[in-house]
Image: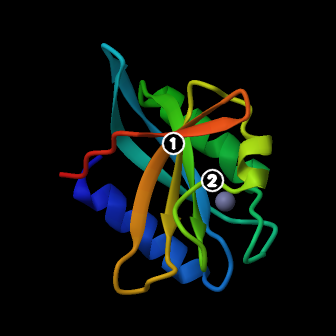
Amino acid sequence: MRKEHFEDILAHTAAALPNEGCGLIAGTIADGVKTVEKVYLLTNIDQSPIHFSMDPKEQFAAIKDMRASGWVLLGNFHSHPATPSRPSAEDISLAYDPSASYLIISLADKEQPVLKSFNIKEGSASEEQLEIH
Ligand SMILES: [Zn+2]
């Protein structure tokens, strides 16, 4: 992803504090490599520091916009306001798409936010390579 995508995710999730922030990630896939073209910043309707649910109307509008732009849904992101950047037991149990990238940004250290990407398959999460340039 480009640096501006990381900055969008950081600004959006920082603004959502003390609650979790969330959104969708769209782009292209070529030879198994995902390229992020747009980050959709969505409302966490749970308004909770430990849970998130994306606003369904915003989600629908984002899917429509990415289709119109010729992109596919690559995955999603959410923040962990006070815990590390790794999927919680709940994140793993709610993950339904083995091909999706699940990005988590930890804001536990405000000076050094940590963004990581995971694949979640059959109840276990593995980190995948994430390049920001
Ligand atoms: Zn989580």
Q: Which label sits on residue 87?
A: 2
Seen at 46% across and 46% down, the residue is 117
Q: Quadrant of ligand 1?
A: bottom right
- Amino acid type at circle 2 is Pro
Position above or below: 45 against 48:
above
Seen at 61% across and 83% down, the residue is 17
Q: What element carries label 2?
A: loop
Between the C-alphas of marks 2 and 1, the distance is: 8 Å
**Quadrant of residue 111 within the rendered picture:** bottom left
Q: Which label sits on residue 67?
A: none
**For the residue with label 2, is its CB less than 8 Å from the closest atom of ligand 1?**
yes
Seen at 30% across and 46% down, the residue is 1
Location of residue 18 in the rendering, given as x and y in whole percent from the top left corner: 65, 86
Q: Is mark 1 on a helix, strand or loop?
A: strand
Position above or below: 15 against 93:
below
Mark 2 closeness class: few <14, some 14–19, many ≥20 residues within 10 Å: many
Location of residue 103 in the rendering, given as x and y in whole percent from the top left corner: 51, 50
Residue nearest the viewer, comparing 58 with 84: 84
Location of residue 130 in the rendering, given as x and y in whole percent from the top left corner: 33, 44
Q: Do the residues labelled 2 and 1 touch (CB within 8 Å)?
A: yes
> Going by the picture, which residue comes out furthest to the top?
31
Residue nearest the viewer, comparing 9 with 88: 88
Seen at 68% across and 46% down, the residue is 59
Mark 1 closeness class: few <14, some 14–19, many ≥20 residues within 10 Å: many
Q: Which colour scheme is used?
A: rainbow
Location of residue 41 in the rendering, given as x and y in whole percent from the top left corner: 54, 59
Which residue is under mark 1?
A: 118
Residue nearest the viewer, comparing 69 with 34: 34
